[in-house]
Image: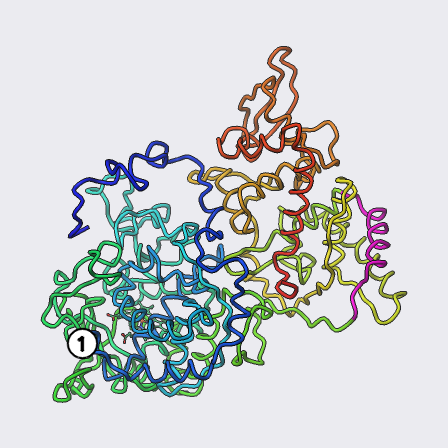
Amino acid sequence: PSGCPMKANHKTVNTGGGGTRNKDWWPNDLKLNILRQHTGVSNPYNSQFNYAEAFKSLDYEGLKKDLTALMTDSQDWWPADFGHYGGLFVRMAWHSAGTYRVFDGRGGGGDGQQRFAPLNSWPDNASLDKARRLLWPIKQKYGDKISWADLFLLTGNVAIESMGLPMVGFAGGRADTFEADESVYWGGESTWLGNDVRYASGQAGPDKPGVIDGDESKKEHTDIHSRELEEPLAAAHMGLIYVNPEGPDGIPDPVASARDIRTTFGRMAMNDEETVALIAGGHAFGKTHGAGPTENVSDEPMGATIEEQGFGWNNKYKSGKGPDTITSGLEVIWTKTPVKWSNHYLEYMFKYEWEHEKSPAGAEQWVAKDADAFIPDAYDPNIKHKPRMLTSDLALRFDPAYEKISRRYAENPQELADAFSKAWFKLLHRDMGPRSRWIGPEIPKEVFLWEDPLPDLDHPVIDDQDISALKKELLSAVDPTHLITTAWASASTFRGGDKRGGANGARIRLAPQNNWKANNPAQLKSTLAALEKVQQNFNSSAKGGKKVSIADLIVLGGSAAVEKAAGVSVPFTPGRVDATEEQTDVKSFEHLEPKVDGFRNYGKGTQRVRTEQFLVDKAHLLTLSAPQMTVLVGGLRALNANYDGSSYGILTKRPGQLTNDFFVNLLDTQTEWQQGQDEIYFGQDRKTGEKKWQATRNDLIFGSHPELRAIAEVYASSSGQDRFVKDFVAAWVKVMELDRFDIA
Ligand code: HEB
């Protein structure tokens, strides 16, 4: 970094965590760090602090008034274009939410990560350091009653409203985190705007082979018309929210840009209509910034000097701000009313033909041919500009499917306004989880399918007496092992990033979940049929209108089976409801399918990801700590709960009982392990050679990884059995209730 007084690199720094570290020595070691993030020690609010409670005393209208006033309160240190910060704040909110991706539910604006690296320093987030700092006086005023995460998004909403377009609504409820999140895979490239890794396995075109062998000099573009973006990524370049505005890899080809846009916006859960609405709506506002050559701009916040105090991208071009701002290096003003909602963006798009040009910073952009200069300048009333567009904008005209939609919106402004408002609301709230987490006075009445809605609980639920009777009935109706696998299959779809999935709703009855291979569909079907009988029996005879849902029966059955196997009681809280097919978006639920689930020994690694790395990833989605992951795997093995009933990792002579045998036998030095075919390992007696066990990498990792072994030792010790049972039950109940925001 420039201006860094330290000549040494971090490996020779001999204090404060410097030096050559484990991740330098053994870069491929299994990393558990993502399982211990955002714990009490990184959070200055103590564990008593409840954001939702604090939010209740927020003066919400007062905050909105202050935000509205801020829009036109131009500051000398960072003047507002056209006297209004609306465009800047809309972009801030969009970049905050826009990192969300459907595959793992990570990213998004849910925990205020734009304050931290790498997002605070992504090239695409240039100048948003200024936007966030403009908000500081307001954040300071309202303190812990409004989180940064909520504030970034609410500010974008208020910005749009203050520019004349009413919004569908807004929900708060995003609590802040206080450390950089390490769990999100943003790509494997080590250069900003690189994309050599994310397209490496895509089909390379015949004329432009994708040579990816680590040799930079041989690196060429993969074919921008056919390459496939690796999962779970939703951005075409390292450090961008979505696509390169200049076109794929900087090639100004609007049709190829459309392909990238469709892929990346699709992975943000947006269809073509929503995508067109978002871009056309978003670029109704503001301008881009490329007043001069980008060499004038210094390092991003993480590379900046200490005296810059968290700012980055210091710009030495003339005044370095206002009319001289350099952000993207593009210099475009889309419409003649950049701080007022309008349909001009699409109007001009079809009215003019577009000519290729370079911005003052040398970036690829487009200017309207034969147009008069009628667009106002952001600062000088005497200057007028011609309409301009980005390559990614023209994708909306030159891609045939986008074109149809764009023309319709161009001719029907109200349709665009409605579609934009709804898509924007979805963009901001997509990763919030169920409505029961939403707070504040502006929650829309309309329920959207992407919320994964649940029916209201409109009847009394089962009481303690019913619960004990039902447990007996369930245990006699279904093999306890199947009760456990069904409960696990149902609850473990939860993912902490976007809070989708979980047992509530009993969507495991419905497509697509009822057909997932990991769920052992045949076995699942017969278990569910038995549960339905129990339900019918109960509901037809229960008094006082009481009913039991299948969702409750699934969890109760699992808990009853664990209780029986453990000999201790397992807490259960009723109140789950059953979702209908109409409330279930099959396509979007497909993203929740586990490709690998080490907890039930399902699936295995790929060329690039080891099996045990998938296990840790799944544990992270389930918001588990390393000890919780360990105790659950050991317990599920003891309970014989592999998805297909296989004996891999069932290191016990008494499967079905909740014992610490898995750990005792795994750590038994008398057993020698050998690798067989297909990631199956055999454990044999060192002396006699007798084959004793079979296991997978999901099992053996608890004996080989030093930190996991350390945890396994705790459970394998003479004092370990009681602790093991207690911890297993707690972790089990945690997983069963991950989605119970209604009781939290
Ligand atoms: Fe945007 C701006 C790109 C989408 C909203 N963008 C912008 C820029 C660029 C872009 C380059 C400039 C920056 C500077 O400053 O320089 N976008 C883009 C792309 C895309 C987009 C490529 C995909 C296609 N946007 C979008 C969306 C939205 C937006 C979706 C919303 C919704 N943007 C925006 C705004 C702005 C922008 C508002 C302005 C800002 C200011 O004004 O500051």
Q: Is residue 346 above or below residue 590?
A: below
Task: State the residue position of label 1.
Answer: 322
Q: Name the kind of residue labelled 1 in the image.
A: Gly
- Image quadrant in which you'd find residue 50: bottom right
Residue 457 magenta: no
Q: Could you tell me residue 64's position as x and y percent?
A: 42, 82
Q: Could you tell me residue 676's position as x and y percent?
A: 55, 24
Q: How many marks?
A: 1
- Image quadrant in which you'd find residue 553: bottom right
In this rendered view, identify the residue nearer to me: 265 or 705. 705
Q: Could you tell me residue 410's position as x and y percent?
A: 37, 84
Q: Is residue 235 left or right of residue 374?
A: right
Image quarter where the C terminus lies is bottom right
Residue 477 magenta: yes
Q: Is residue 25 above or below residue 536?
A: above
In this rendered view, identify the residue nearer to me: 238 or 297. 297
* Residue situated furthest top in the rendering: 687
Callout 1: helix, strand or loop? helix
- Image quadrant in which you'd find residue 385: bottom left
Instruction: Point out the stretch of residues depicted in magenta.
Output: 460-480
